[in-house]
Amino acid sequence: MPLHCNPPNPYVAACSCFLASAFSTPSTQELGGAGWALFFIWIGVALLVDIAAGVTLLGIGAITLGIQAVRRSLGLRLEVFWVVVGLLFVLAAIWALSGTEVPLLPVLLIVAGAVGLFSLFRR
């Protein structure tokens, strides 16, 4: 049942108008703004509390993928670029937390090259 901004009781009017606007569907721009705000808050907390790099990366990936999940739940189009970026942050977090001695960038470059070659032979 939708909330109306003109109830008979004037004391309830301000509250119901606030609730109606607070629970309206956010725009794409508002979701992006919320994502950036969460990102800056998370980075600030991570720097202030000295959180490990892997956990920081995992938080960034969770925020990025979380915004995309909210977009999907609201019926908005997923932004494939940001899904890939979020997955890369999660991959980097897992890599950092696992204590692997091999650097991530060379492995990603090898995988990208292999995928490129595979796509040529698949045609």
Image: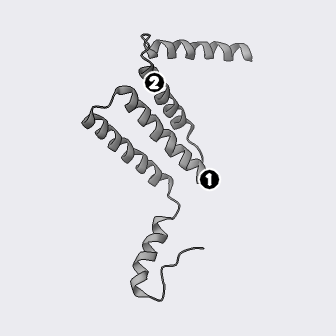
Q: Horizontal placement of 37 versus 109: left or right?
A: left
* Coordinates of residue 49 in the picture (x, y in percent): 27, 36
Q: Quadrant of the C terminus?
A: top right
Amino acid type for the residue under numbered disc 1: Gly
The single residue placed furthest to the left in the displayed view is 48
Amino acid type for the residue under numbered disc 2: Ala
Query: Label 2, on which residue?
Result: 92
Circle 2 — which element? helix
* Distance Cα–Cα, label 2 vs label 1: 29 Å
* Coordinates of residue 43 in the picture (x, y in percent): 32, 37
In this rendering, the answer to whether 78 lies above or below 88 is below
Observer able to see residue 76: no
Tag in front: 2 or 1: 2
Q: Residue at x 50, y 43 (%)?
A: 66
Query: Label 1, on which residue?
Result: 75
Q: Is residue 123 or residue 108 the one in the foreground?
A: 108
Label 2 vs 1, first from the N-terminus: 1
